[in-house]
Amino acid sequence: MKKYIYLLTLLFSLSSSGQEIFWYNVLLEVKPSNTSIVENLVDEYYSDFDFTENTSMTFSNIALKGQNFKETHVLSFTSSSSESLAELRSSLSGNEWDLYIAEIQKHISSARVSAGKSLGIYNQDVDYPIGQAWIFDVNDASSFVNSFEKLMKSFNFEGYLAIGQIIHGVSNGENMYIYGTYKDLNTAFNFGPKSESESKAFDTFSKEVADERYAQSFTRVLIKKYD
């Protein structure tokens, strides 16, 4: 219960400051032999979909992941407005939607959904194709975010970077994430501190969040963006 009180306190304390991004992820486990079929089905449906002005969707393959992460693709719907994102999700209905889902289900092994919101965003206008998520099970969310903000005063990250909450669709207690993007695979390979000051900042951050559980990381590569 203490963990959720911290999360609610953090949510209300940050809800009026900065730009928020709400997201709704559909993760698919695609059978290897059906990858091209599923990617074509997604493209055919969403290429003709009418996205409102402040909503979009990115379709990515999950290229790097831990041993127990079975999903291979993710459709990530995002918006700066929770109302717009909810309306977008509600609009996914009708005969064409039912036909699309029926066809998709023939070629996947499983699917699951998660949703949440970014609480702190850096380099928001940077649009790089490779994204990495670090997932945590955090007891003191406010302290975790404060430590991250302190880190970012000394760490120069080139891509989009966000810290936020996983609010729905969690199976093992994970409730916070850090998400960053890279312009290419070489940059992703070389992620980390580049100077003595950055190394010290990382060491401080690691010590301050040492009691929190780091659950997993995965990396996705953009296939196409729809908006």
Image (cartoon, rainbow, N blue to C red):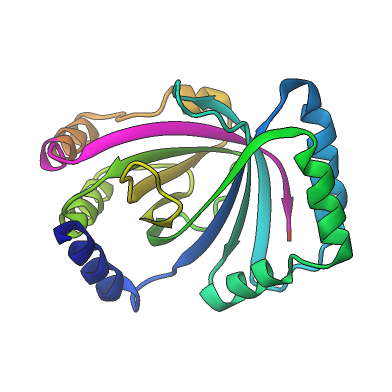
> Is the residue 1 above or below the residue 147 in the image?
below
Is 165 situated left or right of 226 in this image?
A: left
**Image point (38%, 38%), residue name:** 134
Q: In terms of secondary structure, what is the magenta stretch mainly?
A: strand
- Give the x, y percent position of residue 201: 18, 39
Residue name at image x 23 percent, y 62 percent:
4
As drawn, is 71 to the left or to the right of 122? right
Whether residue 1 is situated above or below residue 25 in the rendered picture:
below
Q: Which residue is painted at 38% across and 71% down in the image?
A: 18
Q: Residue 179, position in %: x, y?
A: 43, 45
Using the rendered image of the protein, determine whether residue 24 is visible from the camera's viewpoint. Answer: yes
Residue depicted at x 19% and y 63%: 6
Quarter residue 158 falls in: top left
Q: Quadrant of residue 146?
A: bottom left
| Image location (x, y in percent) of residue 123 | 46, 54
Residue 108 colored in magenta in the image: no
> 2 or 36: nearer the eye?
2
Q: Quadrant of the N terminus?
A: bottom left
Q: Quadrant of residue 194?
A: top left
144 shown above or below 200: below
**Camera sees residue 81:** no
Question: Which of the two residues, 206 or 37, is positioned nearer the viewer here?
Answer: 37
The correct choice, above or below, for 55 with respect to 219 in the image is below
* Magenta residue check for 212: yes
Of the 4 image quadrants, the one containing the C terminus is: bottom right
Question: Magenta segment, which residues?
Answer: 207-226
Q: Position of residue 105 (x, y in %)?
A: 76, 41
With 207 as the anchor, is 21 left or right in this view? right
